[in-house]
């Protein structure tokens, strides 16, 4: 029998890709959307055979109606405490009420389990929801994808296309960083959602590359010289981020405040996926670093 999957955050970047990956795999897909969700994006979901269900996250009856007959809830919501803790908890309560067996929370990040509370604000929110979901009877699956590979396009200190530099912190020029394309994440998440059960935590990466490896690949693509350089020690970086955060209280209300982006890079240089579950379902065509980087490195020159 076809599985029915409810996707929250379905009009978002990752959520819409998860919906399409589920449709491709023959699932019945329902999209939980809000009255204020983007109408054009909903229309696109409908065009692809996805049933939108409109509900406010404060409306427990509508949330429960949305969860009726659902095998797995996938959340690709993005936001701060109200979204990651409050809205996901309301959705989880509705799923539990309807006997939904499985729930994939909107983790989709570096594995925060080995990290210290307080080091990364957005991970702390996920940890708070994890404490709640792990106290319930639902089977939770967290998908840890490191960073979306898109970060490599945005001239961060990790790969600065304008200045042709690749930066790192600590003595970590050979430290492997986990990157996953959004498409690979969506495909893998769809596979996970359609299983009867999976391990609690799944670690994936389209590619794992160190700063030195990144330089080799980038240099071979465009035949130019990117310089690999140490930015600072990790302790200095941590202190710098703390200061940035203290100086910018308005950032507490921003999802991707500058210091939060720095916290993300700090996390990538302090934890990595020791093993990958990439082949556990055997259905995702993983993008290589060279293939991904050549999509935009050539265009940048
Ligand atoms: N690892 C990484 O490098 C990385 C990078 C970026 C994002 N992420 C993570 O990936 C996941 C999806 O992110 P994304 O970039 O696809 O997000 P996105 O495009 O911003 O979409 C998120 C969706 O969440 C819903 N949403 C937004 N605000 C909401 C609110 N106040 N209340 C309820 N729902 C709200 C909306 O969906 P509806 O309108 O359909 O309800 C929105 O389309 C998140 O967990 C995000 O943190 C990871």
Image (cartoon, rainbow, N blue to C red):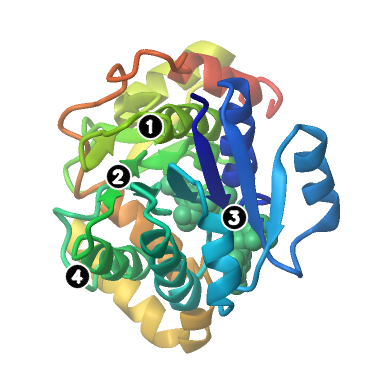
**Mark 2 or 1, nearer chain start:** 2
Which residue matches tag 1? 192
Query: 22 above or below 45?
Result: above
Alpha carbon of mark 2 to alpha carbon of mark 4: how far?
Answer: 21 Å
Q: For the point 39% across and 64% down, which residue is it?
A: 97
Calculate the distance from the C-alpha at mark 3 to the C-alpha at mark 4. Answer: 26 Å
Position of 42 with respect to 83 (left or right) is right
Q: Nearer the viewer, mark 4 or mark 1?
A: 1
Residue at mark 2: 141
Q: Are marks 3 and 4 in contact (CB under 8 Å)?
A: no
The answer to whether residue 211 shows anywhere in this view is yes
Q: Is mark 3 within 8 Å of ligand 1?
A: yes
Q: Secondary structure at mark 1?
A: helix
**Which is more toward the observer, 20 or 91?**
91
Task: For marks 3 and 2, give the CA distance.
Answer: 17 Å
Could you tell me if residue 57 is visible in this image?
no
- The crowding category of the residue bearing disc 1, from other C-alpha atoms within 10 Å (few below 14, some 14 to 19, many at least 20), is many
Quick check: marks 2 and 1 in contact, CB under 8 Å? Answer: yes
Q: Position of residue 62 (x, y in %)?
A: 61, 69
The structure residue drawn at horizontal position 48% and vertical position 71%, both measured from the top left corner, is 87
- Disc 1 + disc 3, Cβ < 8 Å: no
Point out residue 208 in the picture as x, y percentages from the top left corner.
32, 26
Which tag, 3 or 2, sits closer to the chain's start? 3
Q: Which residue is mark 3?
A: 9
Residue at the disc numbered 4: 117
For the C terminus, which image quadrant? Answer: top right
Mark 3 touching mark 2, by CB under 8 A?
A: no
Q: Earlier in the sequence, mark 4 or mark 1?
A: 4
Query: Mark 3 or 4, which is nearer the eye?
Result: 3
Disc tally is 4
């Amino acid at each position: 029998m076809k599985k029915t999957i409810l996707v929250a955050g379905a009009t978002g970047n990752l959520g819409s890709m998860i919906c399409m990956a589920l449709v491709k795999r023959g699932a019945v897909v329902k999209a939980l959307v809000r009255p204020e969700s983007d109408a054009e994006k909903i229309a696109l979901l409908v065009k692809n055979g996805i049933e939108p269900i409109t509900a406010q996250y404060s409306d427990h009856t509508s949330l429960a109606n949305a969860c009726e007959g659902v095998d797995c809830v996938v959340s690709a919501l993005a936001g701060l405490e109200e979204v990651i803790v409050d809205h996901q908890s309301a959705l989880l309560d509705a799923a539990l009420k309807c006997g939904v067996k499985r729930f994939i929370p909107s983790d989709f990040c570096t594995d925060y389990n080995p990290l210290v509370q307080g080091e990364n604000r957005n991970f702390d929110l996920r940890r708070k929801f994890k404490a709640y979901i792990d106290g319930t009877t639902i089977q939770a699956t967290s998908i840890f994808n490191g960073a979306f590979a898109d970060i490599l396009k945005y001239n961060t200190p990790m790969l600065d296309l304008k200045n042709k530099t690749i930066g790192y912190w600590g003595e970590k020029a050979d430290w492997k960083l986990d990157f996953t394309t959004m498409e690979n994440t969506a495909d893998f998440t769809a596979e996970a959602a359609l299983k009867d059960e999976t391990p609690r935590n799944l670690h994936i990466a389209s590619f794992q590359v160190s700063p030195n490896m990144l330089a080799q690949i980038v240099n071979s693509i465009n035949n130019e010289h990117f310089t690999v350089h140490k930015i600072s020690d990790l302790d200095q970086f941590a202190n710098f981020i703390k200061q940035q955060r203290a100086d910018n209280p308005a950032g507490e209300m921003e999802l991707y405040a500058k210091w939060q982006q720095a916290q993300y890079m700090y996390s990538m240089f302090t934890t990595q996926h020791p093993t990958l579950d990439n082949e556990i379902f055997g259905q995702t065509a993983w993008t290589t670093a060279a293939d991904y980087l050549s999509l935009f490195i050539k265009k940048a020159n």
